[in-house]
Amino acid sequence: MSSFTIHGLPVSPGIAIGYVHLVSHALLEVSHYRIPDKHLDAEVARLDDALATVQGELMGLKTAAAQQHREVGAFVDLQLMMLADPLLGSEARQLVRGKKCNAEWALVQRMNVLIEQFEKIEDPYLRERQADVVQVVERLVKVLLGHPGHLPPKRRDGMGSVIVAHDLSPTDTISFRDHNIAGFVTDIGGPTSHTAIVARSLLLPAVVGLYHIRMLVEEDELVIIDGTRGVVIINPEERLVEEYQLRRRELEIERTRLQRLKETEPRTLDGERIELLANIEGSKDIASVRAANADGIGLFRTEFLFIGRDVLPDEDEQFETYRSVLKAFAPKPVTIRTFDVGADKMLNAMHQKHPGANPALGLRAVRYALAEPQMFLVQLRALLRASVHGKLRIMVPMLAHVAEIEQCLQLIARAKEELQAEKHRFDAQVEVGGMIEVPAAALSLGMFLRRLSFLSIGTNDLIQYTLAVDRADESVVHLYDPLHPAVLKLISSTIQAGARVGMPVSVCGEMAGDPAYTALLLGMGLRNFSMHPGQILEIKQGVLHADLNDLVPKVQRILKMDEQGKVREAVARLMG
Ligand code: PEP
Ligand code: MG
């Protein structure tokens, strides 16, 4: 096995050394692995759970269809019959026990046998029923993949696994948290896709945009990922492994060194106190925010409570989550963003209900919330009920129209009325803010300043929409440029407009956590930065070295430049 190196997009820094585990979501390419003897019972139980879950799903569908669509009821009956057929379930069980196949692999093998049998049937109607077999197996595999069983079992040698996939969803990536996953590489994706954002928040080295990586590696091959430089080395020589182990240790030492800044107040050299807040995806992130000693939460991406689920969290479940985060940080502010689903964060139901050709330009974020007011109201009620447990700030994503702001405020008022009538307690003064992530919003700030209490600039989307570059598409990633003069003007004018009227403005996009932009943003007047907790101490280091008297005039000059190359050089000089 010869060693070779490929280059992709570095999206999450650090070094991972581990063994390849191939993962795919395509049904016919589900991962294939052998189950160790002692885990066979658990794997059969996984399969049985999936069979039971899908049976429940189909029964639910049947009940829902019973009144209006009798023909749907008939086809669900057929799928229920296939699900119960021993040729599928029992035979798959045999394959797990006898051949030690993982559950997904066993099901796909059985599906292929059954398809072959259907192919032989002469009656065209019956022959077509093979599509139902495929659909039933798809449902089963989806359930299995939704549970981290598709992740490799922990290795005995203590080494981590490196996930190699065509693409990964943000929810897949979150599920890596509790497994021994060293890092991941994918064929597609961009640095500000939500998958990349989750990887950084889990400190998982990752390289994306590798095009055909799955074709080039095999299960269990040793690989090194350099997530800082975007390099993947397959079958590295011993000498290289040692070199990268050394580099990994150096990075750990650097991280430990930064720990010394934990208790230091983030003040610039000229004494300005800068607020360093954390971005989180759920209550599991509480510990890492505490470890970074953040000033509070600047962005809680609540959509991660919703995606990947067939049954959405109800008001009580949401209330418990919001309450736990608010309590953990009280009296520090906790900014909870209402769900930003759509684009690369689709709800299970959205694929069927709201398909769109350009999801990033479609029914996303506040647009989706206003199209599903009942779902939105449930979240608003849960948030308001939780507001008595800490300092809540409600933030709405992707606003662009005055009608959207007003409708949100009306729904919040309605939620308050309902809660009052039901004698629930809530903070009547809870602040409501909006995200500036569409150029139209940044160019018409007056309507935001008049109606809201704070603003947060979502640079990830602001860049995507200003430059018309899909943030998750690796083929246009070279055009995704935070330093484009148009982007800088929109960011800086938003910060300035807030300062003029005394409204707090933060940046919660990835720019805030990138040390290359700290001096630039400080020089623009930014005082509130929100980023994933792992970046806070590094950004604090930048703040401690910054002198605003020196930076402000230099940044003013940069803002007058209209050539990207010149801007880039000048920003690099700012950082010394
Ligand atoms: C942003 O767009 O910058 C942002 C913070 O929101 P998200 O990355 O979740 O779209
Ligand atoms: Mg956004």
Image (cartoon, rainbow, N blue to C red):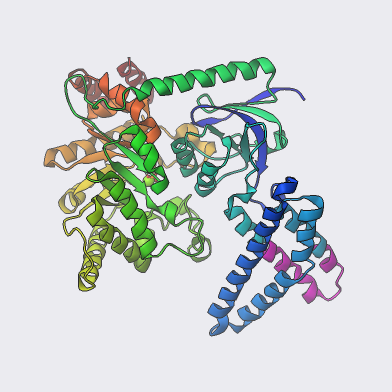
The spot of residue 93 in percent (x, y) is 76, 60
* Residue found at x 24% / y 68%: 419
> Which of the 4 quarters of the picture holds residue 509?
top left
The spot of residue 448 in percent (x, y) is 21, 50
Q: Tell me if residue 493 comes above or below residue 243 in the rendering.
A: below
Magenta includes 131?
yes
In the foreground, 196 or 324: 324
> Main SS type for the magenta part?
helix
The quarter of the rendered structure image containing the C terminus is top left
The answer, for residue 443, to whether it is visible in the render is no
Compared across the picture, whether 179 is left or right of 553 comes to: right
> Which of the 4 quarters of the picture holds residue 521?
top left
The quarter of the rendered structure image containing the N terminus is top right
Magenta includes 391?
no
Residue at the far front in the pictured view: 38
* Residue found at x 22% / y 30%: 274
The spot of residue 477 in percent (x, y) is 49, 35
The answer, for residue 567, to whether it is visible in the render is yes
Residue at the far left in the pictured view: 501
Compared across the picture, whether 99 is left or right of 42 comes to: right
* Residue found at x 34% / y 37%: 290
Q: Where ligand 1 lies, by quadrant?
A: top left
In the foreground, 547 or 457: 547
Q: Tell me if residue 88 comes above or below residue 60 in the rendering.
A: above
Q: Tell me if residue 444 comes above or below residue 364 in the rendering.
A: above
The spot of residue 184 in percent (x, y) is 58, 36
Compared across the picture, whether 23 is left or right of 469 comes to: right
Q: Which residues are magenta?
A: 115-137
Compared across the picture, whether 115 is left or right of 389 comes to: right
